[in-house]
Amino acid sequence: MIDESTTNSEVVLEVEDLVVHYELKNETVKAVNGVSFSLTKGRSIGLVGETGAGKTTTALAIMNLVPKPPGVIKSGTIDVCGYKMLELKPKQLEKIRGKEISMIFQDPMTSLNPVIPVGDQIAESVRLHENVSASQAYDRAVEMLELVGIPGERAGEYPHQFSGGMRQRVLIAIALACNPRILIADEPTTALDVTIQAQVLNMINDLKKKFGTALIMITHDLGVVAKMCDDVAVMYAGRIVEKGTLEDVFNDTKHPYTEGLFNSLPDISKKGTDLKPIPGQIADPTRLPEGCAFAPRCRYATDACREKPPTIHQISPTHFVECTAYDDPGFHIEGWQNHG
Amino acid sequence: MGDTILEVRNLKKYFKSPRGMVHAVDGVQFSIERGQTLGVVGESGCGKSTLGRCILRLIEPTEGEVIFEGRDICKLNKRELKELRKDMQIIFQDPFSSLNPRKTVLEIISEPIIFNKLMKGASKAEIENRVLELMDTVGIAERLINSYPHELDGGRRQRIGIARALAMNPKFIVCDEPVSALDVSIQAQILNLLKKLQKEMGLTYMFITHDLAVVHYFSNDIIVMYLGQIVEKAPSEILFNNPLHPYTKALLSAILVPKVGGNKDSIQLRGEVTSPIDPPDECRFAKRCDYRCEACEAGNPPLLEVEPNHFVACHCIKPGENLLKEREGYVSAG
Amino acid sequence: MSREQMTAVTQKQGQSATLASRRYKKKSGFVESWNRLKTNPGAMFGLIVLIIMVLLMIYSFLFITKDDVMAINSGNRFKPPSAQHPFGTDSMGRDLFKRTIYGTRYSLTVGFFSVAFGFIVGVFFGTIAGYFGGWVEEIIMRVSDVMASIPGMLLGMVIVAVMGPSFLNLLLAIGISNISGFVRMARASVLSVKGSEFVEAARAIGMSEMRIAFSQVLPNSLSPLIVTATARIATSVLAAAGLSFIGFGVPVPLPEWGALISDGRSYLSLAPHLTLFPGIFIMLVTFACSLLGDGLRDALDPKLKQ
């Protein structure tokens, strides 16, 4: 699949056919089942999905941080700025993590070391990757704090002295301290209040523009995607079911799951219309069916959908959807009920 | 229309802490009509969860009255309160910790019935049939009757919580963030279920949440809380179309709409939430408010009805007079 | 639907159809735990050893009389292990094998009952302390602290010195020394569970605090307590042996294992088998209890696994 959006600029990340399973004593969790996408410099892509979609596992795999037992990378290649992440040795990976690619996790409460002042935690990242003196690293740490909106004087304080939103900013400062080309943000604002979320997301956007960082935004919130992302990949049961630019996926929705997600959201501009939820339960990654994993919940599903893996259709140079229903050229989904 | 089922007057809950007195709920006043839903929104620390529990007397209020169907429940003794428990129930946020891990679905749902002797003299089979009926109402398959909570997913667990709340045939249910811990597609299922139950059983809800889109969808009236106080109260359409309090405006502007280009820059609030410990006698939002003036430090603003059914607690907004409108130009220029 | 109508409808339905709860069997937590325990080799070894010990004890009740164990036979002294006397004979010519097997009565009963005593008393007070807090907690915990600060052996010696050496006093002494550990554990366990929302839910249906403490909270705190109890059996057996060794346990001629070791102490070079066999038995029981305790910890809380 050649993604036209990437041919003219520098590609910083290329994921191909990634398959990651967790092999437990009694069962195997098929977390990621053939994910491919790429990211260009300065652009942001949203990985959208619910629990069990495989978003976090994909992100961990990109950093080669999947816990090795029980995680197994069954196949796939990951190329970060030319480095083949799945083939490098641990020592080489350590050089790349933090320098070329960084990640911030969901819970700011537990991601910071409680006994080390925040300035030192930022400086640590600088010292690991750049050949500078301790005081230079500390200066850079203070600079980064200012950049994320925390007064530099607070560099000597400990994590518990900051609120949730500020701790998340500290994490962003650590992640961006060495100016990585790619930032992965795994649900960075889910644990934060709405007004703080707005502040943090605005800040990430500003920094992204300033440094030209490419961003992978993992989230279940379509509002966050609309604000932050240029491209979108919708995931279900470890596969990308729809992929395209923001306009493609939001304004020209093709996949029934994506349609269902939009229909599950209350629309502020239209009160009173009943929500049209997706029936049934989320697919169990230990018991995935032969055909399309979404078929049991899909109102357009046909026998062909249940029997074989879904076909990939290209709607436009940038827009792809994985859905057997589109084998029939006349097929189309009904569109959002709540789309305004 | 007035069939007021619940009226809360000057409700306060203070907690002692090593650093002083925490004003978790500080003088809250509102009423709910039978069959309606009151939405309660606010961010962390605003006191909404504490408020919900005080209304049920799961936490003892420090001061104030909670009048349910004409009786002040704060004045009831233990026996009378136990009787009342059948009419007022609660659905919790976390479907993982709100169910006893050692009990089966059958035991969890039948417990309120058995404990309160609601089906006196009924046989085991009769009680079980009542449980099956409840399970069917909330959409849990019969075959799960002997399952344990850890064998089921979040959506099903939440349904068990709802069935348990319904077991005693209550009239009023406090829903404390009932869908916040669920996936989006499951959230919508549960919201639809709650709406259906309200229609069929004539339930009254107090719906506590931080999610503004959900509260707009679900509520008739909404109260916005900040640091233990109500800053604005209005029917939901009016609140969303014409928010008056600066905090409400900031909150609404922070909502991220799932539409391309639908998110203009939000109003950035200054600083962080101030402390609920021994708060000074002034408008608690003043320090973060773009429109503040000297008047804002003159004591706590009262909640006034500035338009029909629309209440605001702000020194600068009074019936017929909105000083903030003049300052709006001043603020956006500055 | 009113409550009266509800009762009437379900009374009708109730008469037909088999109970759904019979059709869909409950997956017993006990059976699941047992299945998990089976896969742990150490725990199974421990369990088998303990079962053998109990069988030996039953054997001793049926086939070994006090006479067998006490009768002095000066012609037979210090015989090494042979077919007739599998463990040899002691300084009074008595068959060590019979004496050792007879000794299971003391060790196993002390082990089990002293722990049961400490468990029941300790968990009761620990639960109350943890659940209710306030001055109740203060009083219980301070008393428990005082008890904990007295070494078990010392307490045993004091009790026996005051009340005279007897098997029952030994049991009491070790039982009392077991209490404070359980008080502390039960309190900690309860503290971690009592803030859970299902406790609030129980309150919301009108349950009293006392009832919530024992019917909702305690069952959820039991796993670590059971594990500790099993491990405690080992230490209690050791404590009993220790007290008997120094003469403060079971009255002298009775063949408690510690007493047997004490007897054989003076003859180590002449007849090492006198200390060896009882020592091995003590070691086996202690080891078995530890292994079983570890296995139980993993088997009882499956949610921790995944």
Image: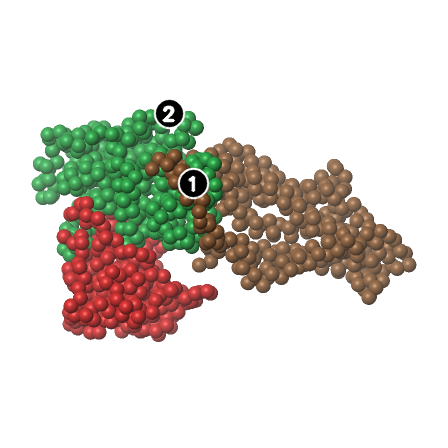
Which chain: red? A
Q: Please, is residue A309 above or below residue C181 in the view?
A: below
Q: Which mark is residue B75?
A: 2
Q: Identify the secondary structure beneath mark 2.
A: helix
Number of numbered discs present? 2
**Residue that appears at 46% across and 39% down:** B122
Q: Identify the secondary structure beneath mark 1.
A: helix
Based on the displayed image, in which of its 4 quarters is residue B327 positioned?
top left
**Residue that appears at 38% across and 52% down:** B141
Q: Amino acid at mark 1?
A: Gln
Q: Which residue bears the numbered disc 1?
A: C11
The picture's colour for chain B is green
The picture's colour for chain C is brown
In this picture, residue A113 sits left or right of residue B221 = right
Residue A278 screen position, x and y as percent: 27, 56
What kind of colouring is applied to the model shown?
Answer: by chain
